[in-house]
């Protein structure tokens, strides 16, 4: 198992054992587990990620395909875009979601708010400047 997959497995186990709360690098941060189907393999995958809650819709969250500022998009992003749906575990609740990619001013507003709250996201944007724009996805309860 790769180091990243092993780390994800540990975060997932801790999330599920503690009603959606984890320690370490994610301590205190809003975290969801996003279930997505591989666009090539068809296998189900689970990816832990930080989210930004929607201002007024409690069953809508935004997630960020930052890949820690890597020059390529993460596989989970390509899977969700290809399929257009998935599910999330948030706290102790699990529910299906539809996927919508934000663009333009809407994308920038949401990303900027995440970067304001969690400065690591500003660093990810600096690392990808001129290479790619980090995608923002809206996950809304289906």
Image (cartoon, rainbow, N blue to C red):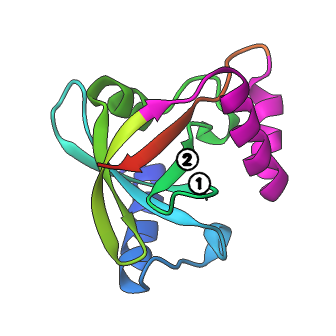
The span shown in magenta is 100-129
- First in residue order: circle 2 vs circle 1: 1
Which residue lies under the disc numbered 2?
A: 62
Q: Main secondary structure of the magenta part?
A: helix
Of residue 137 and residue 119, the one placed in the foreground of this image is 137
Residue 133 position (above or below residue 37): above
Rendering coords of residue 100 (x, y %): 44, 32
The percent coordinates of residue 98 (x first, y second) are 33, 41
Q: Which residue position holds label 1?
A: 54
Q: Secondary structure at mark 1?
A: loop
The x, y position of residue 1, in whole percent, is 34, 52
Question: Cβ–Cβ below 8 Å for labels 2 and 1?
Answer: yes
Which residue occupies 68% across, 22% down?
Answer: 133
Q: Secondary structure at mark 2?
A: strand
Compared with residue 33, is residue 93 higher up or lower down, i.e. above or below?
Answer: below
- Asked if residue 105 lies in the magenta stretch, the reply is yes
Real-space Cα separation, disc 2 to disc 1, in angstroms: 7 Å
């Amino acid at each position: 198992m790769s180091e990243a997959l092993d780390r994800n497995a540990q975060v997932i186990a801790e999330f599920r054992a503690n009603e959606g709360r984890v320690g370490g690098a994610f301590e205190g941060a809003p975290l969801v587990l996003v279930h997505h189907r591989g666009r090539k393999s068809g296998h189900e995958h689970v990816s832990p990620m930080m989210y930004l809650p929607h201002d007024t819709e409690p069953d809508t969250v935004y997630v960020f395909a930052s890949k820690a500022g890597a020059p390529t998009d993460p596989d989970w992003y390509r899977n969700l875009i290809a399929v257009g749906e998935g599910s999330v575990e948030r706290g102790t609740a699990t529910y299906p979601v539809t996927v919508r990619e934000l663009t333009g001013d809407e994308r920038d507003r949401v990303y900027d708010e995440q970067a304001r709250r969690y400065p690591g996201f500003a660093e990810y944007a600096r690392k990808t400047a001129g290479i790619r724009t980090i995608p923002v996805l809206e996950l809304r309860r289906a």
